[in-house]
Amino acid sequence: MKFSRLFWPIYYKKDIIYILDETRLPAQVTYLKAKNYQEACKAIKDMKTRAVGQVILVMYIFLQLVRKNQGKKNLLPLLRKVAKTISATRPTLSFRYLTDMVLGWEKQRLPLEKCIVRFLETLKNKRILQAETASKLFKNGDCILTHCNVSGLLPLIAEFCRQDKKKISFFVTETRPYLQGSRLTAWELQEAGVPCTIIADNMVAQVMEEKKVSKTIVGADHLARNGDIANKIGTYQIALLSKHFNIPFYVLCPPPSQARTGNDIRIEIRPDKELLEFQGVRIAPKGAQGYYPAFDVTPHTLITRHIPLEISR
C-alpha cells in the first residue's frame, strides 16, 4: 500500500531527526534537520510540522535524548525539562499524554528506547486501522468536504474505498491563513489520484446548499473527555453548517486528554502578522491589526461520529 509523504513526515537517522517542512509544500519537498530537542521544538512552534507529525516528532525527540545519553543513571530530570519545553510549543495541542507516557516508562525503569520504538510502530498501524474504519462510513459516489489536513489519512481512506470498489471525491477548503487545505490536502490527494476540488473557506454554505456535499470529515488536534474537539479554526462553523444541512460530520481524533470539556482547552493565539502577511509580504494596510486564534472548539453535540486513534498508554 502506498502512503502519502504526509502520513509519516518525520524520520530518524544517525541521531538526527529529519522533519518534512510542510510550510514549503507543494513547491518544495525539503527536510529540516534537528540535532537537538531545541531545534525540534522550534519546528513545532513554527508549524514546520503539524498534526500527526508533531506526535511522531515528540517521540523522536525523546528517542534522540535517550540515545545521546546512554549510560546516564538518572534521565528523569532531563526528560522532565524537555517535556516542559515540548508542552510550551503549542498550547492547544495535547502533548501531555505523550510526555506522561515517556516519564512513566522511565519511572518504572522500563527500557525507554524499546518502548518508544514500539509506540511508533503501534502508532503507524493504528493510523492505518483508523483510515480503514473511516472508509466504511462512505459509499460509492460520496463527495466529502474536509478542512485543514489530517496527515495522509484521506488518500489512505480513498485507497480503502477503492479496494471496496467505491469511488469518492473531496471538496477541500483552502484553510486560511496557512492554506493547509489547498497546499497540503489537495497536493496529497492529487498525488494519490483522488479527485478533489478546492474551495475558499467562505464557500462552504453555498456548496452545501447546492447539495454537492454528502459527508464531512475533519481531524482534531485535541479531544476532550466529553467528546468536544479543538481543530483548525473554521471547523466549528463547518460543523454548524453540516448540522443545518443534515450532513454527517465525522472526526478523526487523537486519544482524549485530561480536559473534561472543550471549555478546558486553551486556544492558541498566533502572531497577527501570519494573517496580515503572505509569504513575507504585507497584504493588509499599514496600521490594521489582526486577530488569529489558530483553533476553535466544536461541541460533541454537532459530531455524528468520532473515529478515534486507539493507542493504549
Image (spheres, rainbow, N blue to C red):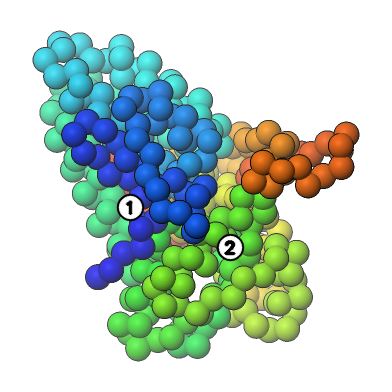
Q: Is residue 120 above or below residue 185?
A: above
Instruction: Report which quarter residue 3 is drawn in.
Output: bottom left
Q: Is residue 188 above or below residue 223?
A: below
Look at the image and tell me whether residue 214 can be seen: yes
Say few, some or many: other residues with alpha carbon within 10 Å of mark 2 (under 14 / 14 to 19 / 20 or more).
Answer: many
- Going by the image, does 189 lie left or right of 263? left
Q: Mark number for residue 8?
A: 1
- Going by the image, does 206 lie left or right of 57? right
The residue sitting at 68% across, 84% down in the picture is 211
Q: Mark number for residue 200?
A: none
Instruction: Report which quarter residue 36 is drawn in.
Output: top left
Look at the image and tell me whether residue 104 can be seen: no
Label 2 element class: helix
For this rendering, which residue is in front, 66 or 226? 66
The residue sitting at 39% across, 31% down in the picture is 40
Q: Amino acid under label 2?
A: Ser
Q: Position of residue 194 (x, y in %)?
A: 45, 77
Quadrant containing the C terminus is top left
Q: How many marks?
A: 2
Q: Position of residue 305 (x, y in %)?
A: 50, 64
Q: Amino acid under label 1?
A: Trp
How far apart marks 2 and 1 lie (CA) works out to: 19 Å
Label 1 element class: loop
Quadrant containing the N terminus is bottom left
Q: Position of residue 79 (x, y in %)?
A: 31, 19
Point out the frontmost of discs 2 and 1. Answer: 2
For this rendering, which residue is in front, 60 or 22? 22
Say few, some or many: other residues with alpha carbon within 10 Å of mark 1 (under 14 / 14 to 19 / 20 or more).
Answer: some
The residue sitting at 50% across, 29% down in the picture is 89
The residue sitting at 40% across, 27% down in the picture is 39
Residue highlighted by disc 2: 182
Instruction: Report which quarter residue 13 is drawn in.
Output: top left
